[in-house]
Amino acid sequence: MAQLEPGPICHSVLTQQKPHRSTKVWKESHRMNEPLRCCRYDSAFWDSKLQSDDRIMTYIRLAGFYGVSRLGCIMLDWPLITAMVDRWRPETHCFQLPFGEVTITLQDVEMLLGLRVDGLPVTSSFPKRTSEECCDTCHDLLGVRPDKESISGASRLVITCLQNPTPLTKHSTDKDVQRMARLRIMQLLGGMLFPSTSNNMVRLCFLDLIADLEGASEYSWGSAVLAYLYRCMCKATMKSASVIGGALILLQLWVWEHIALFSPKMLSFPADLPDRPRGARWSGERCFDDVANHVLKAYRDQLDHMTCDQFEWRPYGDNLDEYPDFCKAGEVIWMTKSPLIMYEVVEWHLPDRVLRQFGKFKQPPPANFDTEPKLHKIDGRGKGCADWSLRHEKYVREWEKRQENVVRAVADDDEDRRWEGEYDKWFELIGRRIITNPVHRHARGFMPLASKLEHLTRVIHDISWMARDELEKNTDISEEHQGYIAINETCVEALKLIGEEKRLESRPDLPIRPSDDADVADDDGDAPPRARDRHRDPADGPQPRRGGRRKKIRVVEGAAAQN
């Protein structure tokens, strides 16, 4: 019997499958159980004494970082983050789950972290400074003077230099308070919002944007955080990656909000929750008794068998009145299809691929869109003095039109549900639905079963339709006829028993390719040959020859798919 096809069958969308880490997981899932190392350096920020100083918090609020500063300290789950990176696609900036595409949006950033999303792009020129001048700037704006060895390339500062500042006293001046506020913001920026994989460094270019604390609030820090997280996840999808940076707390909070399979049970919430962003509710007392916790194989297995009804499309509800203003100020651009900018980093925000996350909207197969992977080759190394606002001028201009580029969605009125079938057929062709290979045997620990169950479900579905076809060919009452009826009824009952009866509505025309550890793309990167088509109508044309390469499948997408 044929083996499970992980996808994609058609490579028109997932053009980078060969170097993607899911290819390696499929081939070596019984050995790839080490999670990515997740970078984060914000422990010093959550010092309770500094958190309680109202003088500092006044200026942090003025700069636009009050919401995220009240998030609370939440530990990262490395295996959970790794399991989600397995499903992140640089081609679409979406996670591919078995039922379709989902992603982290500007709405999630503003709701969960309380960072402004509708504002100026986080980019500018960075004046050329010597190491000595950088030390002077740090002293003037932060109140600490690092040694020259703590300055890297006159553009980055070792974040540990910010861990033990001189404490404020009741006699401290307003200038001292502002310095401490900037230092705390720099701890947030370098430790939690933009942590890099190279070392525990923070960019000195941020100092120019927060020198004027009131002016700092005019920038779209939320979109910059999302751009950098997208970039870090894209890089981490490469087979060779072993470490990941970016605002990983945002990714984890997003998972807990949208996927109840992994979210802990909350035993208590912070007392002042109405004054905090949505993500702060997860900083209370948590219990993981009934969910998988810190086990990569378990996370992958549950995601492999996840269904559409297990994803919470609208966790924040439709009534946003209960949330503070900093969680909803940018609602007008939550659905903008625009480039997100953070200095040298540019990544596209594509809400048209996940319309169901914004309301009761129809989700047609989205049109192909070039996320410009070439942008990943641009980094800030050796370009400390570059003026990225000029280098990325066309993207800055596109961001300025963010309100004009808001996606217009069509409401789902429950009367015409054809879009569901169109989307499902499209995703069946282009999606990478399964991560774990069912042929692998694990020597110890958790034993994944979801991909095995998926394979058996498809085989039963296939057998059911084979029996139906035979019944249509021969209507004579005979023992053979009765046997086909019994086979079909048995298959139908089996699918109903496991809640998969919806599959019976469509014919299993998509191939299930025989393979073991081989992946979807062969060695030269081409799409694999299609399995033999079953029960073909002669009007469909001649049978494809066996062996060799087949022509690639053409998938109609976007507006054309709706006609």
Image (spheres, rainbow, N blue to C red):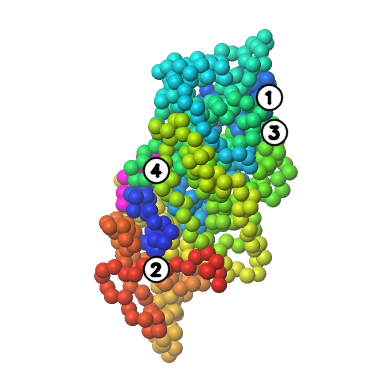
Q: Taking 77 as reference, is 417 left or right?
A: right
Mark 4 or mark 1: whose residue is earlier in sequence: 1
Q: Which residue is mark 1?
A: 58
Amino acid found under the numbered disc labelled 4: Lys
Please state the extent of the stretch shown in magenta in the rendering: 27-36
Which residue is the site of mark 3?
275
Q: Which mark is residue 553?
A: 2
Q: List x then y, in percent, for residue 540.
A: 40, 81
- Front residue of this view, candidates 215 and 61: 215
- Look at the picture and state if 385 lies above or below 450: above
Q: Looking at numbered disc 2 in the image, what kind of residue is underneath it?
A: Ile
- Residue at 49% of width from left, 37% of height from top? 388
Q: Quadrant of the C terminus?
A: bottom right
Q: Position of residue 175 (x, y in %)?
A: 64, 16
Residue hosting label 4: 377
Q: Quadrant of the N terminus?
A: bottom left
Label 2 SS: loop
